[in-house]
Image (cartoon, coloured by chain):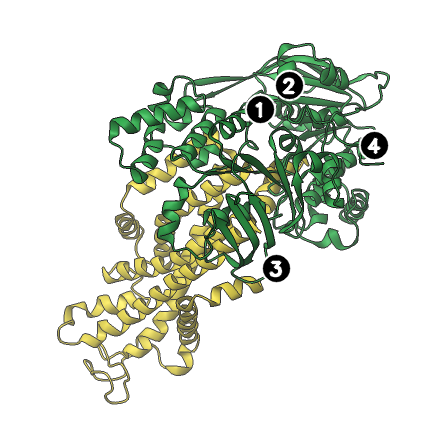
Chain colours: A yellow, B green
């Protein structure tokens, strides 16, 4: 663990990413105190530019505070991204593990199933799913999870296929351990590092996906997410730049940080294994 | 006296990240027209020294911090890369351990050798082609013209190694460095490559640095010997002297550990068979290619005996071991344990037999889960068979004690152990289920010779103590003859001969067995009795 922290801290971008994410999470948690009023509440005149009349980031077309929107939006956006990633990791890892471990017919069936998803452009699939199921937090999470598990399942499947032929797994079979136990205690812990890395990247892409859906007006209409704020103000982009730019910057910084963290995790987790093997 | 071809003086190599020196003040010389064998166990710095001579150390990992490498009087340490470039090939040729990875898999063989000539000479393409064919003839490759157009995967391991040697010799170097060139090869192929290297060395009058860990090989080809340990030269001198009157205790220990002219075990009265194998067949089909791994195998393994299964790579010996233990389902035949048929049982029916047969794996690094503590790794089996956790852990500690790993070993992780220690852990894990039969698949092949001897002793002790039957799978007849009661020799999926170990070793009946025995390196050498 100490080695891991040390390796992670050598990656400066990753450390910066962690700081930004902590700041965003802090903003999300502290939204109640910073902005005591509801983000939907009209608090000021509409079209107030930033830094005027005690609105730091200006107001939108109806006079709602952009700053409050971003803070409360951070809450929803992060929650949504985290939950949808967790769902797709859970599903993707289980499917990939079963497919890679059992092989044969099971594997063929699973790979066919995965390919079914991968042949459909993922964003269109998400749009269609949300449109059919009527937009709400649950359906958006479901749609994001549905389109983001297949690559992860493939990754885990490949890891399992190579690990299941390793001698320590065969030794566990000979020791009479059950398949479930072998999958959970022998193979899974050894294949977690790529999952962790791609998990952090999946959070980033979930944020982008959710923002894109909300931008198109397909997000939960009762949820003030970053994508929603941008979407709501896109028609006045030329008159009131602040309405789209600030939430846009929030998305940019968060996604960039998550990508940097993913890269740092990759550097920290993988060469460590490589080094261990040589010594 | 003439100047030596290559003179290494006080060479010290340090690790870039710090830590102890990998090579400490190593000095040796290579003369024209001789084979110098550098012998040592893994981690002795023998390869690092050779790589330093070739200028192949990667500067971000290893650095030459002191000493000089004189090639015909010229110091090579600190030479810029461009000058190394001309030296390599023209003055030094190198042969690596693994011929498959030394060749580019998607390039025709002839082209790969041709490339060397193209870069370093100004011959035209026709002349180069003739030169390559000539080289192939020199390394005794059959049909040089056909080999020229072949790809690496179409050649056997021995042929590939001949190609690599041809490539190393292409520019007529003065020094040939061979880094364990026969370790990855079968014993019969090894014998051919050894005689080839010796023959070429005599014909071309070059100096050869031959790196190896096998004293049998050394006895066959060395003119002079350098023995290394932990980055230092412990002893050097003419081959005769080192082989027959070694002085340094480490050299004596190494030579004593060499399995050589085994005495074997005393004959035991035959007991009831524990396992009976009848008409076992297995064919692997991969992409239209059919490989028969087992062909009508008939074999009895008696209670308490150690049965050796010897063969070259691809002979089906591992497949047989894995079929007995249920890791590979055979196509046809029968495997009985005390009269009860094991094939065709479903997982639940097989479960009671599962713990009766256990396995010790070849690679001590791959066979332990890197994330599990040793005590957990050993107790997993008994726990899966219903033992309570505290009991299983207590037994694991006792077993570790038994295999010579006491103290806090139980609470440590695999990466904190050496290869030999891990193999002891592997044995302890196999014993944890109190099996009646142990399958040891090349269990000592990855270990250094002195550690190999210790692990063999341990296997011998535990098999006696627990009245175990052991199926000992190996490619090394010397090792098999040392610890087995009987030996079965396999070739291309068939058992060609099965007899008492000493009969197999000293009076082989089958022509193939005789060829195997004749290929064992170091035949002409009478190992000195160092116990006295």
Q: Which residue was labeled with disc 2?
A: B518
| Labels 2, 4: front one | 2
Q: Sequence order check: which comes first, mark 3 or mark 1?
A: 3
At horizontal 75% and vertical 43% (from top left) the residue drawn is B247
Please give the residue where the numbered disc 1 appears in the rendered image: B191
Q: Residue B186: where, in percent of width, then height?
A: 57, 25
Horizontal side, residue A137 vs residue B158: left or right: left
Q: Earlier in the sequence, mark 4 or mark 1?
A: 1
Task: Tell me which label, 3 or 4, sits earlier in the chain.
Answer: 3
Contact check, label 1 and label 2, Cβ < 8 Å: yes
Q: Nearer the viewer, mark 4 or mark 1?
A: 1
Q: Quadrant of residue B160?
A: top left
Whether marks 3 and 4 lie on the same chain? yes
Q: How many marks?
A: 4
Name the residue carrying label 3.
Answer: B20
Asked which secondary structure carries label 3, the reply is loop
Nearer to us of marks 3 and 1 is: 1
Q: Is residue B385 visible?
A: no
Distance, label 2 to label 4, CA atoms, is: 35 Å
């Amino acid at each position: 663990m100490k080695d891991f922290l040390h390796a992670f801290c050598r990656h400066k971008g990753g450390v910066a990413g962690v700081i930004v994410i902590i700041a965003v999470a802090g903003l999300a948690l502290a939204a109640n105190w910073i902005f005591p009023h509801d983000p939907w509440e009209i608090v000021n005149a509409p079209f107030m530019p930033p830094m005027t009349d005690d609105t730091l980031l200006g107001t939108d077309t109806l006079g709602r505070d952009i700053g409050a929107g971003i803070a409360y939006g951070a809450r929803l956006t992060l929650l949504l991204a985290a939950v949808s990633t967790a769902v797709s990791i859970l599903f993707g890892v289980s499917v990939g593990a079963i497919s890679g471990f059992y092989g044969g017919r099971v594997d063929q069936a699973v790979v066919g199933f995965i390919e079914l998803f991968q042949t459909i452009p993922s964003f269109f699939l998400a749009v269609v799913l949300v449109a059919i199921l009527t937009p709400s937090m649950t359906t958006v999470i479901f749609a994001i999870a549905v389109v983001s598990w297949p690559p992860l399942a493939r990754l885990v499947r490949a890891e399992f296929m190579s690990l299941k032929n390793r001698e320590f797994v065969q030794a566990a079979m000979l020791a009479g351990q059950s398949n479930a136990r072998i999958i959970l205690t022998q193979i899974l812990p050894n294949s977690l590092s790529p999952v962790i890395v791609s998990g952090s990247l999946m959070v980033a892409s979930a944020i982008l996906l959710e923002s894109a859906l909300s931008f198109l007006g397909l997000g939960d209409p009762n949820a003030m997410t970053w994508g929603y704020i941008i979407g709501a103000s896109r028609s006045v982009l030329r008159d009131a730049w602040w309405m789209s730019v600030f939430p846009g910057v929030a998305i940019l910084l968060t996604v960039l940080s998550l990508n940097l963290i993913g890269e740092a995790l990759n550097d920290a987790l993988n060469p460590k294994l490589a080094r261990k093997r040589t010594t | 006296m003439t100047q030596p071809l290559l003179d290494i003086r006080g060479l010290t190599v340090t690790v870039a990240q710090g830590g102890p020196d990998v090579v400490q003040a190593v000095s040796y010389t290579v003369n024209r027209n001789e084979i110098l064998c550098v012998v040592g166990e893994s981690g002795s710095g023998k390869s690092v020294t050779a790589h330093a001579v070739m200028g192949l150390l990667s500067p971000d990992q290893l650095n030459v911090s002191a000493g000089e490498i004189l090639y015909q009087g010229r110091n090579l340490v600190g030479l810029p890369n461009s000058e190394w470039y001309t030296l390599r090939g023209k003055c030094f040729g190198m042969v690596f351990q693994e011929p498959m990875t030394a060749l580019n898999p998607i390039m025709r063989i002839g082209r790969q050798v041709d490339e060397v000539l193209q870069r370093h000479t100004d011959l035209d393409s026709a002349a180069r082609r003739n030169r390559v064919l000539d080289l192939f003839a020199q390394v005794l490759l059959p049909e040089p013209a056909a080999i020229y157009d072949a790809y690496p995967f179409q050649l056997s391991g021995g042929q590939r190694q001949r190609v690599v040697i041809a490539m190393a010799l292409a520019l007529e170097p003065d020094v040939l460095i061979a880094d364990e060139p026969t370790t990855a090869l079968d014993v019969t192929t090894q014998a051919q490559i050894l005689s080839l290297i010796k023959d070429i060395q005599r014909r071309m009058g070059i100096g050869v640095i031959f790196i190896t860990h096998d004293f049998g090989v050394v006895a066959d080809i060395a003119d002079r010997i350098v023995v290394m340990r932990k980055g230092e030269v412990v002893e050097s001198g003419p081959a005769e002297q080192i082989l027959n009157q070694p002085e340094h205790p480490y050299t004596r220990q190494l030579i004593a550990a060499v399995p050589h002219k085994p005495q074997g075990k005393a004959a035991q009265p035959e007991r009831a068979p524990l396992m009976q194998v009848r008409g076992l067949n297995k064919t692997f089909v991969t992409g239209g290619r059919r490989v028969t791994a087992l062909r009508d195998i008939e074999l009895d393994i008696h209670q308490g005996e150690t049965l050796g299964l010897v063969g070259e790579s691809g002979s089906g010996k591992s497949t047989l071991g894995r079929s007995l233990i249920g890791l590979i389902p055979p196509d046809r035949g029968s495997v009985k344990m005390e009269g009860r048929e094991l094939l065709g049982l479903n997982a639940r029916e097989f479960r009671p037999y599962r713990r009766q047969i256990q396995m010790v794996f070849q690679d001590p690094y791959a066979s332990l889960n890197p994330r599990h503590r040793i005590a957990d790794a050993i107790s997993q089996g008994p726990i899966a068979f219903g033992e309570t956790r505290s009991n299983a852990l207590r037994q694991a500690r006792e077993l570790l004690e038994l295999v010579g790993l006491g103290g806090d070993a139980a609470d440590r992780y695999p990466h904190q152990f050496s290869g030999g220690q891990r193999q002891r852990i592997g044995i302890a894990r196999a014993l944890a289920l109190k099996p009646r039969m142990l399958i040891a698949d090349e269990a000592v092949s990855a270990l250094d010779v002195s550690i190999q001897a210790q692990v063999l002793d341990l296997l011998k002790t535990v098999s006696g103590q627990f009245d175990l039957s052991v199926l000992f799978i190996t490619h090394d007849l010397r090792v098999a003859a040392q610890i087995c009661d009987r030996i079965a020799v396999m070739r291309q999926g068939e058992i060609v001969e099965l007899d008492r170990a000493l009969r197999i070793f000293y009076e082989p009946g089958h022509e193939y067995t005789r060829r195997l025995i004749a290929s064992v390196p170091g035949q002409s050498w009478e190992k000195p009795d160092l116990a006295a």
